[in-house]
Image (tube, rainbow, N blue to C red):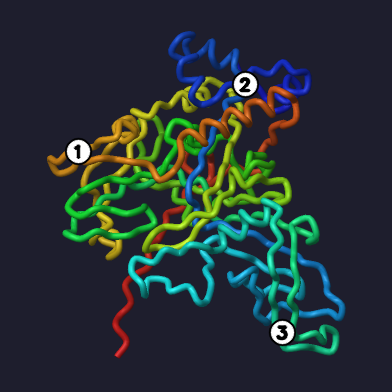
Amino acid sequence: MAKTYEEINEKIKKGQAVVVTAEEIIDIVAEKGLKKAAHEVDVVTTGTFGPMCSSGAFLNFGHSTPRIKLGGGHAYLGTVPVYTGLAAADVYIGATAIPDDDPRNKVYPGEFNYGGGHVIEDLIAGKDLVLNASAYGTDCYPRKKLETLINIQDINEAILFSPRNAYQNYNCAVNLTDKIIYTYMGVLQANLGNANFCSAAQLSPLLNDPLYKTIGIGTRIFLGGGIGYVAWNGTQHNPAVKRKDNGVPQAGAGTLSVIGDLKQMDPKYLRGASFLGYGATLTVGIGVPIPILNEEICQYTAVRNQDIWCQIVDYGKNYPNNIPGSLGEVNYAQLFSGEVECQGKKIPAAPISSYSVAREIAATLKDWIKKGSFELTKPVQTLPGPGNGIVSKVLKERPVSPTLE
């Protein structure tokens, strides 16, 4: 039994497609068996909602009168700097950008109350923001100063483009030192006082297609409340990590580079976030539909939290010093129970991502497909990875440089 994208899309157009979420398929496979489930179900929807620092947006403001060349100059949205090393009217704002006068960690731990992620949220919420720019002036772009209000409806283009989103699995972070530390995995208490993790696990897109059989360049996705696409594999995409027999990686592996129209998006699913003592970021909502082309893919989507394992990593000493190794392995059923064991000690565990919003994203994407407003796209090329005929890439760590005298 095999289906094609064309057959599934035809059923979507006719309102006949059977669409379920990645949670629902688990019970369907358990109740009806793999063969019958694969025959009956056409699409499984996934979702994730968590902080994704490698995110940002390209903006084109249009030209002022007289014209100004932002490229090579300096520009700010509100107090947050934007990257101007593009053309005259294009900038890029990164999720982790922060104001020049932010005290950062000089007042420790820094609060990082407002950054690039918050600017992106404010833009899609329809707020007016001050654009302040300076340039060196040219014959064709004579203006040297510009201060004006901008609104997402007034600017030419607003394109979310994130180089690395939707990490496939990740670490469970703990702290072995005797002091509190402040990390991108949240606040970690001293002496194994807590454990933080970040994944939607059985709902997460790349954990429902662990070998990248259906996800690749051109895959249409739910992105930030609108429609987006997978543009490429994400940076640090590393499919060569160890995997369980079910194909699920035991550590951080695949990533997605994604793109979409920011003007379609919803601040509910793109939200600025502040990490105490670390910095600003953007919390991103992503949902990927998995076409059930055959029984193998159906089996992957029936993965459960207890089937997905991640590594417990010390962020007090080992992670910051790039010392490899794991303190143990834990599955997501254990993590979501609120307690894990490490070095013989039971410690509280909590997510820094939202499972409830991930569930909402999967349900919303399901609804779009059932209504016929969202069809599937066949990728022009699936992601590099094991088992799909593409040579796996291995993530290389930067070697330690000698001290400069």
Give me the C-alpha separation between circle 2 and circle 3: 53 Å
Nearest to N terminus: mark 2 or mark 1: 2
Secondary element at image label 2: strand
Residue 351 located left or right of residue 36: left
Circle 2 or circle 3, nearest the eye: 3
Crowdedness near tag 3: few (<14), some (14–19) or many (≥20) residues, C-alpha within 10 Å? many
Would residue 34 be found to the left or right of residue 65 on screen?
left
Residue nearer the viewer, 384 or 292: 292
Q: CA distance from mark 1 to mark 3?
A: 57 Å
Q: CA distance from mark 2 to mark 1?
A: 37 Å
Q: How many marks?
A: 3
Q: Quadrant of residue 160?
A: bottom right
Task: Give the residue drawn at x 57%, y 31%.
Answer: 362
Comparing 68 with 209, the one in front is 68
- Residue appearing at x 59%, y 48% in the figure: 270
Q: Label 2 belongs to which residue?
A: 19
Instruction: Identify the image quadrant of the C terminus.
Output: bottom left
Residue beneath label 1, please? 341
Q: Tag 3's secondary structure?
A: loop
Residue under numbered circle 3: 135
Question: At which x and y percent is residue 314?
Answer: 25, 54
